[in-house]
Amino acid sequence: MKCEKAKTNPSKCVNSGQSSCGTDHLSCRVPEDESEIQDFSRKIRGQAFGILQRSQIIENEQRRKKKELDEKEQDLCWIEELKAKDREMEMNEYLAELTKKKALYDDIAKQIASQEQTTLRDFEAEKRHCEEIIANELDEINQLVNFHRNVSKLCC
């Protein structure tokens, strides 16, 4: 069944220059009676329905892909949020550890400073005590020397 020259308008023929007998394309021939018109309408509706089905399949596929991408994006956001929370927790733990170390350092520095003062006070007290003992012993020695001088003056 080829396009008939008398009843065909080639400018309106979708597949001009091709055979109209293919299953994918409608005939280029203008239908003449009611049964041909109904048959032609049925073919057009069938093709339209096929096109609608294909477009729905494509639309559903695009929705599915978009949903997958949205889910992946949401998962990535959650992962980034979890990573940020983990980093924040690690930093808080590190900060707490540093705070403890600084407090320990400050306590040790205070203890060393107070020990130096205590040691210095003890040293000063010990020095005064030793000086007193030496002064007392020097007084005793001087008294003995003076006593021996006085005794030697009396004896000689």
Image (tube, grey):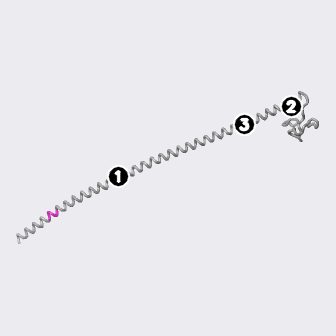
Q: Residue at x 35, y 52 (%)?
A: 110
Q: Magenta part of the protein: which range? A: 137-141
In this view, the residue in front, 26 or 146, is 26
Q: Residues within 10 Å of mark 1 (few under 14, many from 20)?
A: few
- Could you say where residue 43 lies in the image, as x and y percent from the top left? 84, 32
- The residue that label 1 is drawn on is 110
* Quadrant hosting residue 132: bottom left
**Marks 3,2: beta carbons within 8 A:** no
Locate the C terminus and report the quarter of the image it occupies.
bottom left
Q: Secondary structure at mark 3?
A: helix
Q: Amino acid at mark 3?
A: Glu
Earlier in the chain: of badge 2 and badge 1, it is 2
- The residue that label 3 is drawn on is 59
Q: Which mark is residue 40?
A: 2
Q: Amino acid at mark 1?
A: Lys
Earlier in the chain: of badge 3 and badge 2, it is 2
Left or right: residue 137 versus residue 37 is left
Vertical side of 135 occupied by 67: above or below: above
User: What's the CA distance linking mark 3 and mark 2?
Assistant: 28 Å
* Quadrant hosting residue 76: top right
Q: Residues within 10 Å of mark 3 (few under 14, many from 20)?
A: few
Q: Nearer the viewer, mark 2 or mark 1?
A: 2
Most common secondary structure along the magenta stretch: helix
Left or right: residue 141 versus residue 81 is left
In the orientation shown, which residue stands out farthest toward the bottom? 156
Vertical side of 63 occupied by 143: above or below: below
Locate the N terminus and report the quarter of the image it occupies.
top right
Earlier in the chain: of badge 3 and badge 1, it is 3
Residue 8 painted magenta: no
- Could you say where residue 27 lies in the image, as x and y percent from the top left? 88, 35
Q: Residue at x 61, y 40 (%)?
A: 74
